[in-house]
Image (cartoon, coloured by chain):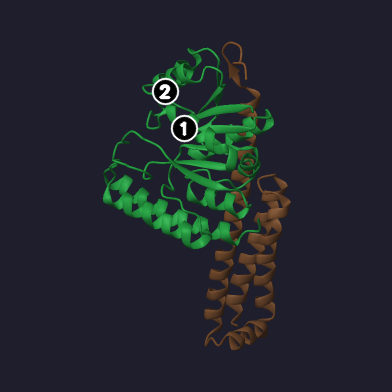
Amino acid sequence: MPLNQRIFACSLALLFFVFVIDLARRKKLRVEYSVLWCLTSVSILVFVFWYDSLVFLTGMIGAVLPTTTLFIMGLMFLMFVNLHFSVKLSEISEQVKNLAHEIALLSIKKEGPEKPE
Amino acid sequence: MKILIVLPARNEAGNIGAVLDRIAALYPDYPVLVVDDASIDETASVVLARSGVNLIRLPFWMGYGGALQMAYKYAYRQGYDAIVQLDADGQHDPASIQDLLAQMQNADVVVGSRFLGSSDYRMSSVRRFGCRLLSFLGKWLTGMEITDPTSGLQALNRNALGIAVQDHYPMDYPDLDVLILMHRFRLKVVEIPVRMAQSPDKTGMHEGLQVWYYAFKMILSIFVMMLRKA
């Protein structure tokens, strides 16, 4: 890997890492959600400093160029992240629905006495 | 037997009054609950103008299933033995309530079908085909004979309520998938013939797409329900 590519990738990973940590520090991002993004930065750094691992992976998946491997991994990562967010969204929708039901039950309005049963 | 009559309603100010008056005339002894799904018209005022009708107002639009589940939770916690649900738009005749309740002796869920018996109910060919397809799917998967899988006129006993109050009850269209869910929990689902007023036929691009979304979502939901542990 040429030196300028290394410097570029390394800077990008570090900048991203600092940005994620700063978001967590400013309470814009929950720490449990920052772990995944921190690991992304670390993965990029691993490939920069241990380029052979990327070449090895390329051979394993049958790709020709390491850039292909990177694109495939990036795409897979984004797909899984989106799926993870859909799961979280479903969970939150269920919680919001249950909360709204509880609020509605608490604020039930009655006009006159309930009819005898 | 403690019975509750349930009407989920959204923007039904023009229709719900007549439905409530007819219920009050036919069944003065049954309590009625209206779940107002965040209507933007005068639905709530129309309901509150009638004495003895309980009203629950949802804080935001949750969909037909969300409003129904709200009623189920209320009935379940208040200790009702059974509920009868009908639409607030006047499509369902309150006179059918007694027929549904009569069948509760030998079933957990009773569905009012517009296609059983001598029916003159008219429906667009696409919808009719969809109903038949769902009926076939229900019979193929469970052996249940459901001729009207989209009927909102139903009676549920406490066993069925206990299942319907659980998480992941469909928020938009709880139809055949819920009946299959009940069947998976070994509850007995039966249909009886009822008369229904004609519902306005939906036309236009958006409604057309909704039909296809409904079909796809319902088939997916049915298969997911079949895969879940009862």
Residue that carries the numbered disc 1 in the rendered image: B86
Rendered residue at 68%/30% (across/down): B79
* Quadrant of the image containing the N terminus of chain B: top right
Residue B112 sits above or below residue B226 on the image: above
Q: How crowded is mark 1: few (under 14 residues within 10 Å), some or many (20 or more)?
A: many
Left or right side of A32 for B156: left
State the SS at label 1. Answer: loop
Q: In this view, does A11 lie above or below B145?
A: below
Residue B128 visible to an observer of this rendering: yes
Q: Colour of chain A?
A: brown
Between A111 and B157, the one lying in front of the other is B157
Task: Name the residue beneath numbered marker 2.
Answer: B19
Q: Which amino acid does label 2 sit on?
A: Val
User: Do the residues under discs 2 and 1 have CB atoms within 8 angstroms?
Assistant: yes
Q: Distance between the residues labelled 2 and 1?
A: 10 Å
Judge whether residue B37 can be spotted in this image: no
Between B52 and B62, the one lying in front of the other is B52
Residue visible at 62% across and 20% down in the picture = A117
Could you tell me which residue is drawn at 51 percent across and 55 percent down? B221
Task: Report x, y in % for residue A1.
Answer: 60, 83
Chain B shade: green
Question: Toward which corner of the image does residue B80 lie, by quadrant?
Answer: top right
Q: Quadrant of residue B30?
A: top right
Q: Label 1 amino acid?
A: Leu
The disc label shown at residue A73, or none: none
Residue B142: x percent and y percent? Answer: 53, 59
Q: Is residue B164 above or below residue B3?
A: below
